[in-house]
Amino acid sequence: MAMDAKHLREKAALCFRLADGLSLNNPSRFQLMQMAEDFRERAKELEVQVARQRQQSQSEEPDNRGKQFRR
């Protein structure tokens, strides 16, 4: 199953909500907060990676606009 940035951000939000419901001194709260931050960072990294791939694929496509109808 491929993870996309939206999925990772949803997981981060879930971890933040769960952590918010725990007492401040609960060790699980700290673990959930760290997981949420990790999910958020991975989402950002994935978005950058996808943007680079799109940019590379667009730069590799030949620019045929306007050249098709010249004779």
Image (spheres, rainbow, N blue to C red):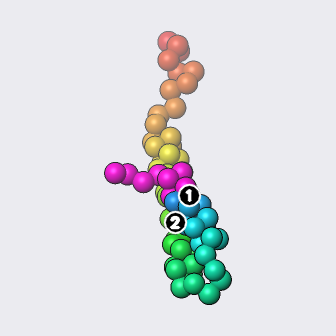
- Residue 24's spot in the image, x, y percent? 65, 83
Residue 43 vs 35, above or below: the answer is above
**Residue neighbourhood size for the residue with mark 1, other residues' Cα within 10 Å, grouped as few (<14), some (14–19), many (≥20):** many
Q: What element carries label 2?
A: helix
Q: Label 2 belongs to which residue? A: 39
Query: What residue is shown at x 57% (from left), y 21% (from top)?
Result: 66
Q: Where is mark 1, residue-wise?
A: 9
- The answer to if 2 sits in the magenta stretch is yes
Report x, y in % for residue 12. Answer: 56, 63
Question: Where are the magenta residues, as a range?
Answer: 1-10
Front position in the image: 30 or 45: 30
**Above/below status of 65 relative to 25:** above
Residue type, mark 2 in image = Phe
Identify which residue, 48 or 44, lies in the foreground: 44
Q: Which of 43 and 57 is in front in this view?
A: 43
Percent x, y of residue 34: 54, 77
Task: Identify residue type, mark 1.
Answer: Arg
* Residue lying at 55% horizontally and 55% vertically, measured from the top left: 10
